[in-house]
Amino acid sequence: MTTIAPSLLAADFADLGRQIALAEEGGADWLHLDVMDGHFVPNLTIGPPVIRSLRRRTALPFDVHLMISDPDRYIDDFRAAGADSITVHYETCHHLHRTVQKIRGTGARAGVCVNPATPESLLVEILPFVDMVLVMSVNPGFGGQTFIEASVEKIRRTAAMARDVKPGLYLEVDGGVDTTTAPRVTRAGANVLVAGQAIFGAPDIPGAVRALRAAAGA
Ligand code: DX5
Ligand code: ZN
C-alpha cells in the first residue's frame, strides 16, 4: 500500500484548511509540510506557528520536511507544533546520528533526505536508526519542477540497500511526482509519494489524490 502525502507547498495559502479537507476527502494518508529557510534552499515558507494552526484542522499525520540549516535547533519546536515525522537533509547535519536520536527522542519518526547530487550510499551507517529515507527527485526549494530521471535508479538502489538493513523502511520520493512518474518510482521501491503540483495544482483535488493512488498501483 502506497502512502500518499500531498505537499501543501502548491496549495492556496489563503485557504489551507479547506485545501487540506479536499486532500483528505480524496484519501490522502499524510500531509507533507515543506519548511524552507532561505539559506539551505533559495526560498522561504512556513514554520511552527502555521503548523500548529493546521494541527487543529486535521487528524492527518504531519510529515515535516526541513530544508533548513542547523535543523537541531528547531526539532523540539516542530514536534510541539504537531509534526509526526521530521525529515532532515543529510547535507545540513554534521552529526546526523545525534540529530536522528534527537528526533526520535521527541517521539516523532525520523527521516533523512538526500539531494539529487548526494549518493544514497552515504546513508549506509544511519539506515538502521531512521524510519524513513527521502530521495529528492528535484533540487529542493520549489514545487512544480521536472522529475530528475536518475532518481528511479537511485530509489531502486536505496530499496535494495534497505532490504537487508532496514526492512519496513518508509522510502519516500519528493519532486515531480505525478501519474506518469508515480508508477515508475513505486515499481522501483518507493512506498511514500509526495506530490504538490499534481494534487493542489489540479482543478479536482480529491480526484487528483485518487488518480495518483491508482497510478501508483495501490
Ligand atoms: C520541493 C519540496 C516538495 C515540493 C514538491 O523542495 O520538497 O515537497 O512541494 O512539489 P512538486 O510535487 O510540485 O514537484
Ligand atoms: Zn518536500
Image: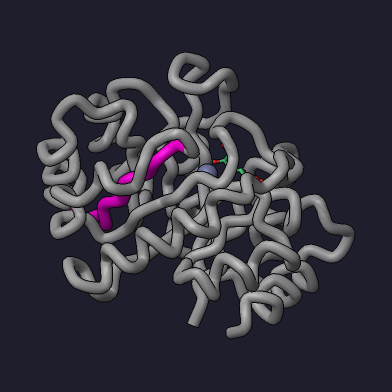
Residue 207 position within the rendered picture, expressed as x and y whole percent measured from the top left:
79, 73
Is residue 111 within the magenta segment? yes
Q: Pick whichever, 103 or 176, lies toward us.
A: 176
Q: Quadrant of ligand 1?
A: top right
Q: Farthest residue to the right: give it.
A: 203
Main SS, magenta residues = strand
Residue at horizontal 31%, vertical 50%? 111
Residue 19, placed above or below residue 60: above
| Start-end of magenta stretch | 107-115
Residue 170 in the image: x percent, y percent? 36, 65
Location of residue 155 by image quarter:
bottom left
Q: Examine the rendering and report whether any part of residue 25 can be seen.
A: no
Residue 23, picture quadrant: bottom right
Q: Taking 31 as reference, is 117 above or below it?
A: above
How many numbered marks have been drawn onto this rendered protein structure?
A: 0
Check the image and report above or below for 83 versus 69: below
Give left or right: position of 62 versus 72. Answer: right
67 within the magenta span: no
Residue at horizontal 80 percent and vertical 51 percent from the top: 201
**Does 126 sit left or right of 91 as displayed?**
left
Q: Nearer the viewer, residue 197 or 127?
A: 127
- 51 and 188: which is toward the camera: 188
In the image: residue 178, left or right of residue 75 = right
Quadrant that contains the C terminus: bottom right
Q: Is residue 47 left or right of residue 4?
A: left
Q: Position of residue 17 (x, y in %)?
A: 65, 52
- Identified at 49% across, 83% down, the residue is 1
Q: Nearer the viewer, residue 198 or 53?
A: 198
